[in-house]
Image (spheres, rainbow, N blue to C red):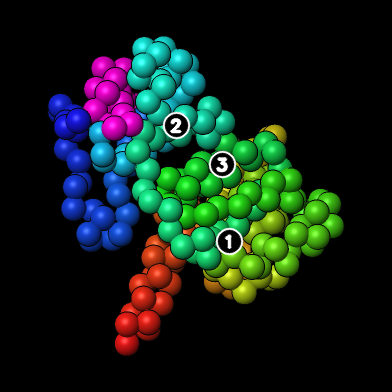
Amino acid sequence: MECRSQGILFDHDRPGRIGLPEAVLSEGKTPEALFSLLSAFRKGCGRPVLFTRLSPQFFGSLPEDLRESYDYDPVSRTAFGESFPLRDPSLDVAVVSAGSSDAPVSREAARTLGYLGFRADLYEDSGVAGLWRLSGRLEEINSHKAVIAVAGLDAALASVLGGLTPRPVVAVPTSTGYGLARGGESALASMLLSCSPGIAVVNIDNGYGAACAAARILNLLDTARSGGASG
C-alpha cells in the first residue's frame, strides 16, 4: 500500500538527521486533513507515523475499518498504524508519575517510547505526599537507563527523583491542580527552579517531547555501545 498525504509536507529526512521520525499533532487540524492523514498511514502502509492529541470523539467518528487499522489509546490520545521494530530491551525508560490524574501525559510518554521501539515501564501514583510509594520502587526505577518524571501541583517529584537517581531525568510539568497551579505554570516553575542538578524540563503536558528526549539518550547509548563492540 502506497502512503500519500495530500497537502501535508512531511519531513522525510528527519530520522537520518536526528534519529527521530516526524509525528502528527492532531489538535487544531481540520477533520478533512486528519481523515486524509489517518487514511494514508494506517496499518499496512509500511511507514510508521505517530498521531498525538487525537481525541476519542474524532477517532470514534471514523469508519470502523479505519479504526481497526490503528493502535489507539483514548487516555493518552495517541494512535499509530505501524510502529518501529523492538529495540534491545535493556534500552529502557522508567516513566514515573505523581498521580493517576497525570495519566494522559505519562501514558503519552510511555506510548511514544513504545511506538519508537523502546521499552517503557510506568510507575504511577508515586507522588511525594506518600514518599514510601516512591522509595519502595526506587531500586527498580534506577535499573532503567533514563527516567521521565511527570507531575503537576508543586511538582516536587522531579526534585526528589533528581536527588535519588543517577540516571538522566526528563521532567514534565502537568496542568493538574487547582487555583494557583495555573494550568501547570506553577509546576513548570518548580521544575525549572529545582535544586537537584542536571534535570531537563520540557513544556507543560508534553509527554511526547519528554519521550523524544529520552529516546535521544537511548540512541546515543546504543550508538556508543555498537561502536565499542565494533572497535
Front of the two marks 1 and 2: 2
Q: What residue type is labelled 1?
A: Val
Q: Quadrant of residue 195?
A: bottom right
Instruction: Give the residues in magenta.
Output: 27-44
Q: Which amino acid, mark 2?
A: Asp
Q: Give the percent coordinates (x, y) of residue 83.
A: 37, 43
> Can you give x and y, in whole percent of width and height, for residue 96 in the image?
64, 53
Q: Mark 2 points at which residue?
A: 71
User: Mark 1 vs mark 3: which is more N-terminal?
Assistant: 3
Q: How many marks?
A: 3
- Labelled disc at residue 147: 1
Quadrant of the snapshot with the N terminus: top left
Q: Residue at x 70, y 70 (%)?
A: 164
**Residue 207 visible in image:** no
| Alpha carbon distance from label 3 to label 2 | 14 Å
Residue at the far bottom: name it.
231
- Let me know if residue 135 appears in the view: yes
- Residue 205 shown in magenta: no
Q: Is residue 40 a member of the stretch shown in magenta?
A: yes
Contact? badges 1 and 2 (CB < 8 Å):
no
Vertical order, 177 against 135 (above or below): above
Sort mark 1 into few (<14), some (14-19) or many (20+) by Cα contacts within 10 Å. many
Q: Residues within 10 Å of mark 2 (few under 14, many from 20)?
A: some
Q: Residue 107 carries which label?
A: 3
Q: Quarter of the image holding residue 230? A: bottom left
Instruction: State the quadrant of the C terminus.
Output: bottom left
Query: Residue at (50%, 43%) from the top-left corner?
Result: 111
Upstream in sequence: badge 1 or badge 2: 2
> Type of residue at label 3?
Arg
What residue do we see at 65% from left, 45% from top?
152
